């Protein structure tokens, strides 16, 4: 540009304005260097959102490089709208997980709804039709009315958006802990299917190509949403309500169908949704990825409100909008499809070769910034990290001072009624989990399973994370989350083929939080590497902190597994009386960080269980072989609540017919509570038809995986005898199925004070 | 047979219905855009489930003004077979092709689960392959399925055997406990007095394949095809 001062009106940018934009002095200096001059207010706003933690990953990016991102199935790794893996038959599965924590705390219904809207757009932007949604939620304990309000609001927000879109919500997980009272977590996962050769990317290729805006009109909602999501909260956060966007799932459904029609007719060069930082991030990221520039006129952007400034148009986070790039001559066909679906659309600019994001309002240039500087050259921080002083205290747990369990039956019922373990039917009954007619395994088993029409295949999906483990030992916690997610998939008969992550942490400017983050990332990376599961997409959410209190480190994994034949799918519940019950893996003295300690002893302490990744891997391949040979009737991952809860769940979670069990467990040298409620990883409870037992034993022993016969499936009570040395009975548990079922099925609704059919 | 499936903006079970008719029942299914004005050549019409126009204002209340609805009404008037599923049922009510209205579910929230319905009238083009009193397990997924009408209309529905499905328990008992949404008289589906238009809240297309562990819904589609086969000569053109 020749005459800066005339083209760009210069307001004096005071120190105060710069600070309001969340930019540090150092960052401002970098802006001056990139521009070679002072920015104007619009440009400052653009830098502020693009360099926010939320958009730039400035505190996390150096560490995320540790993730293994390659593998023979990887079609698209991190850096795009979503990752993609090859599932054969010419198809790719496209998936990603994202957080919407901050908005959901301020306005639970809309915050959660727009979270679902955002992740869906990430998937269909890649050209894939979304076929499954999952979510991971964290709330404070339900005895506080405020937490009930947040929980109910989030669930109805997810339900309203996903149901209307016609994308089934097939699974997920929810845990409760008071640490989330002022920072609930809403992580949403979506998976779509696309013909591998039709995968689209967010590229603004080809100078002279047209840039089109389609979807909702732009309003003033959500301005600086990305900046809000990059800050901590305090008691005044309620005032940020206007920063939360409002979702319109009907419009998004139209947008989805229109986008898939563009792809069918091959009309696009590139496409990106306008999520955080709206028009700004979509345009400069598309240009930056392609090494081009974009020139656009904000006056041409469809608007909902009069007299919006360029600043407002560029930073608005109005939902349900897309930016497209199409070759000249194809724009009319794009506009025609938009007319058919009743969607606003306009050509707003073109791709240039000069690498600049140039924004005009009519003839006036209002901002001009190198696109690459915005998208890729933001600040990078290797922030100081150190374990917190309280870490040693957290990990110390003197078991000798802890009385062993006296009445295991009573403890079992308590655990089955703990909202983290109890059935989430009250929740998933509100989600349409069957639309699409692909859901083979509905919510309520270890993993959800969705068949792929036109093939013999199915995909299993799960979301997992245990923040208490991560608090106590973030490295182990990260690895245990990966191992559990993979184990859940394997229990359904699926080979894990890819993972996406959502890393929820506190304020990264605190060394203890940064330490938790780095350790958890390392734990996840090491486990993924050993188990050979590539990380193909992900999201980091920092600043989950209110009034100085950070959440527990909460990395959540969304993992996808491939099932080659729909006949070889397993669920967690017992199926026939007489089937033999076995435990694969070994029970050790693993009480640290357990749900048992929290619920019964009100302690969140100790060291989480040690994870032997080689054993874990061995277990997976062995169990997969058994399931693929159709030798396993049920397989249930043994995790929160330990062996007794797992057994009870296999008894009572069958959708129509519960079964009993007659089981004898040898105590070995373990405490009774460790034996029954400890959470040693790498364990799976299976049931096997009697005629298959020999073949199973041979396979398992050959693989070197520990296996123990526990008993058999019955039509009576759940009877468990613990035997000491010389088969001396140490204790006996005999519970009617109805008692356990009642506790497990209805506890959540009871705590919420609602009726449940 | 040619099965026409109407696609309204926001329909989301259109493709599921098309899949069942083409892949499971071996028929030709055709997606018909709501702006079209003809259902020519179709042997039967399906109004699928979903959220037409986002269910904004009231379920089905905007969709019934779509241009295609005149053609559907005319088709029905000539005796053509029309099946409305879930949102399609709601549209049929709004369009006046079936009597009554839908209220919000009794518990005020969306419900997605398997429900049991009892076949109250097995002598309809949609149920001729069922046994009277047969219990079907069919998925429901709706927030507004609480059927309501005035006492006179209800008596007429009862007297004319227009109530085709009632919510029941697994053993076929029609009880208030087995009523998932508060529907009047446990009504899950009704037909018009001529018998050629049926609306039901459950989704038979979601229970039509063994891989989904449910094939109870197939009975409805088999009934439709059998009725079409029989009446082939009398079908409107």
Image (cartoon, rainbow, N blue to C red):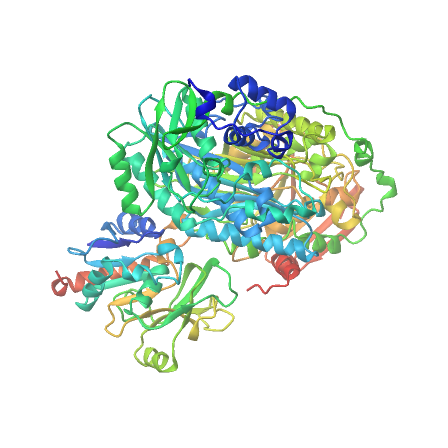
Q: Is residue A683 left or right of residue A89?
A: right
- Residue A549 percent across, percent down from the top left: 73, 40
- Residue B15 percent across, percent down from the top left: 32, 48
Considering every residue shown, the one lying at the far front of the view is A6
Q: Quadrant of residue A552?
A: top right
Q: Give me the residue at 72% from left, 25% from top.
A: A385
- Residue A262 percent across, percent down from the top left: 30, 36
Residue B204 vertical position relative to residue A504 in the rendered view, above or below: below
Figure label count: 0
Residues A325 and A702: in front is A325
Residue B30 visible, this angle: yes
Q: Quadrant of the N terminus of chain A?
A: top left
Residue A631 visible, this angle: no
Residue A736 vertical position relative to residue A728 in the rendered view, above or below: below
Residues B86 and B29: in front is B86
Residues A24 and A270: in front is A24
Residue A465 vertical position relative to residue A754 in the rendered view, above or below: above
Considering every residue shown, the one lying at the far right of the view is A401
Q: Is residue A550 left or right of residue A536?
A: right
Q: Quadrant of the C terminus of chain A?
A: bottom right
Q: Give me the residue at 23% from left, 50% from top.
A: B30
Q: Give me the residue at 65% from left, 49% from top.
A: A420
- Residue A563 percent across, percent down from the top left: 45, 36
Residues A677 and A176: in front is A176
């Amino acid at each position: 540009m020749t005459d800066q001062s005339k083209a760009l009106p210069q307001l004096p940018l005071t120190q105060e304005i710069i600070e309001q934009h969340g930019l540090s002095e150092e960052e401002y200096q970098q802006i001056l260097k990139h521009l070679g001059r002072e920015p104007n207010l619009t440009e400052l706003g653009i830098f502020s959102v693009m360099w926010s933690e939320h958009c730039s990953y400035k505190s996390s990016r150096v560490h995320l490089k540790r993730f293994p991102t390659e593998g023979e199935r990887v079609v698209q790794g991190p850096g795009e709208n979503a990752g993609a893996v090859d599932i054969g038959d010419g198809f790719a599965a496209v998936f990603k997980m994202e957080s919407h924590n901050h908005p959901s705390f301020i306005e639970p219904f809309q915050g959660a709804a727009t979270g679902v809207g955002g992740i869906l757009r990430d998937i269909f932007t890649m050209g894939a039709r979304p076929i499954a949604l999952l979510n991971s939620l964290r709330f404070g304990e339900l005895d506080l009315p405020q937490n009930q309000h947040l929980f109910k609001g989030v669930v109805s927000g997810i339900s309203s958006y996903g149901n209307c879109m016609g994308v089934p919500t097939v699974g997920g997980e929810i845990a409760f802990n008071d640490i989330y009272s002022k920072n609930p977590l809403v992580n949403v996962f979506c998976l779509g299917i696309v013909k591998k050769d039709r995968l689209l990317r967010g590229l603004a290729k080809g100078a002279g190509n047209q840039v089109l805006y389609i979807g909702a009109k732009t309003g003033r909602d959500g301005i600086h949403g990305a900046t809000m999501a990059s800050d901590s909260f305090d008691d005044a956060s309620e005032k940020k309500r206007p920063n939360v966007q409002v979702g319109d799932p009907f419009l998004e459904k139209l947008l989805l169908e229109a986008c898939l029609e563009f792809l069918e007719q091959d009309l696009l060069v590139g496409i990106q949704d306008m999520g955080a930082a709206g028009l700004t991030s979509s345009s400069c990221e598309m240009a930056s990825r392609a090494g081009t520039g974009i020139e656009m006129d904000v006056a041409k952007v469809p608007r909902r409100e009069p007299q919006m400034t360029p600043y407002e148009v560029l930073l608005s986070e109005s939902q349900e909008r897309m930016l497209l790039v199409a070759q000249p001559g194809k724009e009319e066909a794009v506009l025609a499809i938009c007319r058919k679906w009743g969607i606003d659309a306009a050509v707003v600019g073109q791709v240039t070769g000069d690498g600049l994001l140039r924004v005009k309002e009519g003839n006036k240039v209002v901002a001009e910034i190198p696109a690459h500087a915005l998208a890729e050259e933001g600040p990078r921080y290797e922030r100081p990290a150190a374990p917190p002083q309280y870490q040693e205290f957290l990990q110390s747990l003197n078991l000798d001072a802890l009385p062993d369990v006296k009445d295991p039956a009573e403890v079992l019922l308590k655990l089955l009624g703990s909202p983290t373990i109890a059935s989430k039917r009250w929740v998933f009954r509100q989600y349409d989990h069957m639309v699409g007619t692909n859901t083979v395994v509905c919510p309520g088993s270890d993993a959800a399973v969705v068949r792929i029409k036109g093939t013999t295949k199915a995909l299993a999906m799960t979301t997992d994370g245990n923040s208490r483990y991560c608090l106590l030992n973030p490295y182990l916690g990260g690895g245990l989350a990966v191992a559990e997610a993979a184990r859940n998939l394997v229990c359904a008969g699926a080979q894990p083929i890819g993972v996406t992550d959502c890393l929820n942490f506190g304020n990264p400017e605190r060394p203890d939080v940064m330490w938790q983050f780095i350790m958890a990332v390392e734990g996840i990376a090491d486990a993924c590497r050993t188990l050979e599961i590539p990380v193909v997409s992900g999201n980091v959410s920092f600043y989950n902190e209110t009034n100085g209190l950070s959440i527990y480190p909460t990395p959540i994994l969304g993992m996808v597994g491939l099932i080659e034949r729909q006949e070889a799918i397993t669920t967690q519940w017992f199926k026939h009386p007489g089937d033999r019950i076995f435990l694969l893996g070994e029970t050790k003295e693993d009480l640290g960080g357990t749900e048992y300690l929290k619920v019964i002893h009100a302690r969140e302490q100790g060291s989480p269980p040690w994870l032997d990744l080689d054993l874990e891997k061995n277990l997976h391949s062995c169990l997969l072989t058994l399931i693929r040979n159709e030798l396993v009737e049920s397989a249930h991952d043994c995790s929160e609540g330990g062996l007794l809860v797992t057994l009870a769940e296999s008894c009572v979670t069958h959708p129509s017919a519960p079964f009993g069990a007659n089981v004898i467990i040898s105590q070995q040298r373990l405490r009774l509570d460790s034996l029954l409620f400890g959470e040693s990883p790498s364990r799976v409870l299976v049931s096997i038809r009697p005629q298959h037992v020999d073949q199973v034993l041979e396979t398992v022993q050959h693989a070197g995986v520990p296996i123990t016969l526990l008993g058999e499936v019955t039509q009576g009570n759940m009877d468990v005898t613990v035997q000491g040395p010389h088969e001396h009975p140490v204790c006996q548990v005999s519970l009617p199925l109805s008692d356990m079922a009642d506790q497990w099925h209805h506890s959540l609704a009871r705590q919420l004070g609602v009726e449940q059919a | 047979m040619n099965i026409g499936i109407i696609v309204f903006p926001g329909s989301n079970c259109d493709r599921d219905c098309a899949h069942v008719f083409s892949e499971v029942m071996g028929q030709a299914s055709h997606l018909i855009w709501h702006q079209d004005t003809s259902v020519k050549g179709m042997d039967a019409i399906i109004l699928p489930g979903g959220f037409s126009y986002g269910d904004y204002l009231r379920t089905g209340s905007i969709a019934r003004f779509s241009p295609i609805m005149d053609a559907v009404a005319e088709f029905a008037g000539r005796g053509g077979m029309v099946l409305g599923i879930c949102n399609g049922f709601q549209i049929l009510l709004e369009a006046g092709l079936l009597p009554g209205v839908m209220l919000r579910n009794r518990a005020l929230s969306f419900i997605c689960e398997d429900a049991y319905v009892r076949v109250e009238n097995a002598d309809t083009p949609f149920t001729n392959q069922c046994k009277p009193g047969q219990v079907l397990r069919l998925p429901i997924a709706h927030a507004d399925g609480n059927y309501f009408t005035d006492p006179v209309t209800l008596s007429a529905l009862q007297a004319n055997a227009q109530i085709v499905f009632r919510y029941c328990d697994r053993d076929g008992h029609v009880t208030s406990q087995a009523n998932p949404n508060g529907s009047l008289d446990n009504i899950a589906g009704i037909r018009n007095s001529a018998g050629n238009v049926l609306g039901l809240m459950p989704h038979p297309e979601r229970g039509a394949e063994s891989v989904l562990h449910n094939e109870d819904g197939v009975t409805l589609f088999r009934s439709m095809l059998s009725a079409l086969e029989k009446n082939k000569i009398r079908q409107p053109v």
